[in-house]
Image (tube, helix red, strand yellow):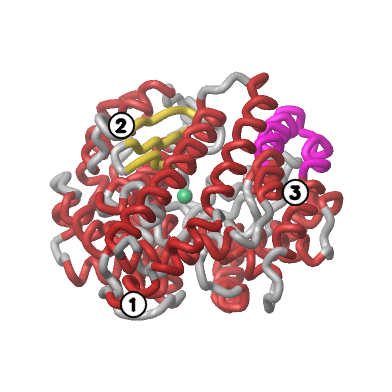
């Protein structure tokens, strides 16, 4: 009989292989969205499907199941936070979830995602939702098949949500979102004439903005031995290991928006970069949840990246980089433009106050599609109707309406809510941060972001998936998920704009 130690080593070896395959799959997606020529798509779809099937086979093997059973003693006799107990606990959760899904369904979902992404690009280029619609019909059929693998459940949406926000229930999200909607719909409707944000738009050559963005990220802690920044249509970040962080952006040459998306993706990248190195090649080497991941991108993009103390340091440098556009624009005008609140049709370009309403409407539409109350054919109008109702805006067409996001074409439902949950968590973390590190913003003015990075490493990042999202939040801020600090933050944002 092998002893527990060698069983655990065997487990690590198997989990290492599964993690390698997942990372390779991440590399293929990164390549798909940054480098691959369009005609590579059909072959890439097959490659991704094959990898998904192999990963599924390893992740659901009888040998892995037997090993996890044999390791129950070791898990129970080890401290909850220990490496051994954490690896076994999280691996078991993944195994039990994955066992429910037939390998063929996994491969089919992966294939449909690859083809859906391509159809989305084509539909956008042609301004024609009909190009995407058959893919969406197919994806919804697959979502139903996927959900059916998880019976019994209280709410079918719980199944989808659990993939991104482990343990969270649809009813919990609905309660938080009802609170956000109650508060924000009237707040947004009452906003007067928006501040002038024209200084953010104009001639901002892509290559110059890319260089400036890299300078900011380097100051924040990006290291080009372990990070890359590439161009894409829909910016994202992926960690291929803790020392291979790929972030992407889209510099349009006409605005500073690409900079903000870099700041956002940096937050995701830093999370992956600062996970405890011991967790490499195990299922612990990932964010605690998508919501926690978003809390990091939102914190760097919004709270830090739109903050006055940050720009006291960076703005003179930005003016040097773009003298024609910004030489005559004072810092306070730039800062107010960056914090402008104005309802618009685009989620990606939305300000902090209107942003959550874009998420609430997508969450509601996903649930309606799952229930069959809204079909893909109805979707463009249903989408536009909610934009009118919550934000009082009208999309000019499908490209800035229902086709603006990639998610429904290439990923599963259940992801959108995590964006707004990330906002909520980001403000809870920030409140704690400025209590723990009172001179944080003075340090930003000097260009020193290390204290922020270190606090996040210690209280959030290093844990990876070893703690559940509620455990992590409780330890980091001393309480459960709470929308009130976030709402107070948004109200103060609006008040600051109105008083200035
Ligand atoms: Zn993000």
Q: Is residue 489 left or right of residue 168?
A: left
Label 3: few (<14), some (14–19) or many (≥20) C-alpha neighbours in 10 Å: many
Q: In the rendered structure, which disc, 3 or 2, sits on the residue that comes first in sequence?
A: 3
Q: Which residues are magenta?
A: 113-135
Give the number of the disc on residue 318.
Answer: none
The local secondary structure at tag 1 comes to: helix
Q: CA distance from mark 1 to mark 2?
A: 46 Å
Q: Residue at x 48, y 57 (%)?
A: 64
Q: Residue at x 51, y 28 (%)?
A: 31
| The magenta stretch spans residue 133 | yes
- Asked whether, in this view, residue 208 is left or right of residue 178, the answer is left
Identify the residue at horizontal 68%, vertical 46% (top origin): 109
* Label 2 residue SS: helix
Q: Earlier in the sequence, mark 1 or mark 2?
A: 1
Marked residue nearer the N-terminal end (3 or 1): 1
Where is residue 192? Give x, y as percent: 54, 60
Is residue 258 toward the left or the right of residue 185 in the image? Answer: left
Circle number at residue 76: 1
Residue highlighted by disc 2? 214
In this rendered view, identify the residue nearer to me: 147 or 3. Answer: 3
Nearest to viewer (mark 3 / mark 2): 3
Tag 1–tag 2 contact (CB < 8 Å): no
Q: Position of residue 49 (x, y in %)?
A: 64, 38
Residue 490 in view in this figure: yes
Judging by the rendered image, the residue that carries numbered circle 3 is 139
Residue 261 among magenta residues: no
- Please state the horizontal and vertical placement of residue 168, each as a whole percent of the image: 53, 72
Q: Quadrant of the C terminus?
A: bottom left
Disc 3 beta carbon < 8 A from ligand 1?
Answer: no
Tell me the mark number nearer the camera, choosing from 3 and 1.
1
């Amino acid at each position: 009989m092998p002893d527990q130690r060698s069983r655990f080593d065997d487990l690590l070896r198997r989990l290492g292989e599964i993690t390698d395959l997942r990372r390779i799959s991440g590399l293929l997606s990164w390549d798909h969205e940054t480098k691959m020529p369009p005609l590579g798509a059909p072959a890439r779809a097959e490659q991704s499907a094959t990898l998904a099937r192999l990963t599924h086979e390893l992740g659901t093997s009888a040998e892995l199941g037997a090993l996890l059973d044999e390791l129950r003693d070791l898990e129970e006799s080890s401290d909850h936070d220990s490496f051994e107990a954490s690896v076994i606990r999280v691996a078991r959760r993944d195994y039990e979830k994955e066992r429910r899904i037939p390998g063929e369904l996994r491969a089919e979902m992966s294939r449909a995602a690859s083809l859906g992404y391509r159809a989305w690009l084509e539909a956008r280029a042609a301004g024609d939702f009909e190009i995407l619609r058959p893919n969406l019909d197919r994806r919804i059929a697959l979502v139903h098949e996927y959900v059916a693998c998880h019976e019994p459940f209280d709410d079918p949406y719980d199944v989808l949500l659990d993939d991104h926000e482990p343990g969270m229930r649809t009813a919990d999200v609905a309660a938080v979102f009802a609170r956000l909607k109650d508060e924000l719909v009237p707040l947004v409707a009452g906003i007067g004439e928006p501040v002038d944000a024209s200084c953010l738009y104009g001639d901002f050559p892509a290559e110059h903005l890319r260089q400036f963005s890299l300078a900011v990220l380097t100051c924040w802690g990006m290291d080009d031995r372990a990070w890359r920044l590439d161009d894409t249509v829909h910016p994202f970040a992926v960690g291929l290991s803790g020392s291979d962080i790929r972030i992407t952006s889209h510099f349009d040459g006409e605005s500073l928006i690409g900079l903000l998306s870099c700041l956002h993706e940096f937050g995701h990248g830093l999370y992956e970069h600062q996970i405890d190195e011991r967790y490499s090649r195990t299922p612990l080497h990932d964010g605690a949840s998508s919501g926690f991941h978003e809390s990091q991108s939102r914190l760097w993009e919004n709270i830090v990246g739109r903050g006055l103390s940050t720009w006291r340091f960076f703005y003179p440098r930005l003016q040097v980089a773009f003298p024609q556009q910004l030489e005559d624009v004072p810092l306070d005008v730039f800062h107010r433009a960056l914090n402008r609140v104005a309802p618009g049709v685009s989620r990606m370009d939305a300000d902090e106050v209107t942003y959550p309403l874009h998420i609430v409407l997508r969450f509601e539409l996903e649930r309606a599609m799952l229930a069959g109350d809204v079909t893909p054919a109805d979707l463009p109008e249903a989408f536009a109707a909610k934009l009118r109702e919550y934000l009082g805006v009208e999309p000019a067409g499908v490209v800035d309406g229902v086709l603006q996001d990639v998610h429904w074409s290439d990923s599963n439902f259940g992801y959108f809510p995590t964006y707004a949950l990330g906002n909520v968590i980001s403000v809870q973390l920030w409140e704690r941060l400025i209590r723990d590190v009172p001179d944080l913003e003075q340090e930003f003015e000097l260009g020193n972001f290390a204290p922020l990075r270190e606090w996040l490493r210690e209280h959030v990042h290093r844990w990876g998936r070893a703690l559940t999202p509620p455990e992590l939040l409780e330890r980091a801020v001393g309480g459960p998920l709470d929308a009130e600090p976030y709402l107070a933050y948004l109200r103060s944002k609006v008040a600051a704009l109105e008083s200035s």
